[in-house]
Image (cartoon, rainbow, N blue to C red):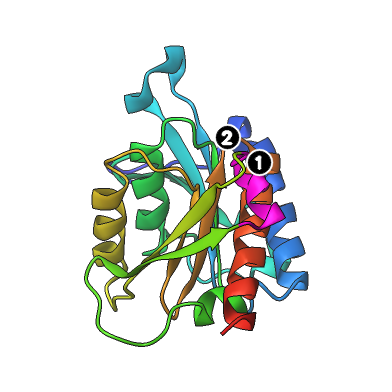
Amino acid sequence: MSAGAPGALDDDTLELREQLADLGRRYHTAGWLMGTSGNLSARLRGSGGASDDDRVVVTASGRHKGRLGTEDFVVVDLAGRLLAAGRDARPSAETSLHLAIYRHTPDAGLALHVHTVASTLVAPDGPGGDVAIGHAHFRGFEMIKGFNLWEEDATAALPIFANRPHVPDIAAAVERYYATPRGVPAFVIRGHGLTAWGADGFTADRHLEVAEFLCRIAVARR
């Protein structure tokens, strides 16, 4: 292997790759990951719990999520440096969104970025800065308990970021926002899609389904 070239995918990431491939097929069947859209990732903790050693397994660019195999992934560090890759695999620009989450959310173990109809339409058109329209607020809905919001008057505030042609610009806005701890483990990019995360696959999947349900409510009640 030449200096600086990525290595092959290791067996220690195989279980995570299989899990992400299964999720990709399920979300494609649901219509949440059409064509080659979206990305799925998981964090592999560093040795001795040192976060600087964490690695991220993420779907490679241009791969159909309904047909993912275990070679359709790359491994990067938290700075985005490519460490390992499957056959002909390269990182997607949207990898930067996942890294922004992992760098500022120590408990995040798996992140899911999908392109659903409701999350694409939830934010109205209009000018916006880092957070396009502020937040979509949901109060009094049973489903927000899926975010562990159990208080009687709890409100789920789902942040909505402006879309940018250069995805790392979106990731930079996400990183600035999550430099301060936030309550809802999900966000929307206007006209683009939905991202959610959790400590593990079950939790991340739950958060994604809850956020998608709330986006449908927001669109339906206009």
For label 1, the residue is 203
Instruction: Identify the residue at horizontal 66%, vertical 45% (top origin).
Output: 145
The foreground one among 178 and 155 is: 155
Left or right: where 159 falls relative to 173: right
Q: Secondary structure at mark 2?
A: loop
- Is residue 108 highlighted in magenta? no
Residue 20 visible to an observer of this rendering: no
Q: Secondary structure at mark 1?
A: helix
The three-letter amino acid code for the residue at tag 2 is Ala
Span shown in magenta? 140-150
The three-letter amino acid code for the residue at tag 1 is Thr
The foreground one among 201 and 139 is: 139
The quadrant in which the C terminus is found is: bottom right
The quadrant in which residue 47 appears is top left
Residue 159: horizontal and vertical position, in percent? 40, 60
| Circles 1, 2 touching at the beta carbon (< 8 Å) | yes
Separation of marks 1 and 2 at Cα, in angstroms: 6 Å
Residue at far top of view:
48
The label number, if any, that marks residue 199 in the structure image: 2
The foreground one among 222 and 83 is: 222
The foreground one among 61 and 146 is: 146
Left or right: where 90 falls relative to 216: left
- Is residue 146 highlighted in magenta? yes
Left or right: where 27 falls relative to 5: right
The quadrant in which residue 110 appears is top right
The quadrant in which residue 17 appears is top right
Left or right: where 61 falls relative to 133: right
Residue 123: horizontal and vertical position, in percent? 44, 78
Instruction: Identify the residue at horizontal 50%, vertical 59% (top origin).
Output: 195
Instruction: Identify the residue at horizontal 78%, vertical 71% (top origin).
Output: 29
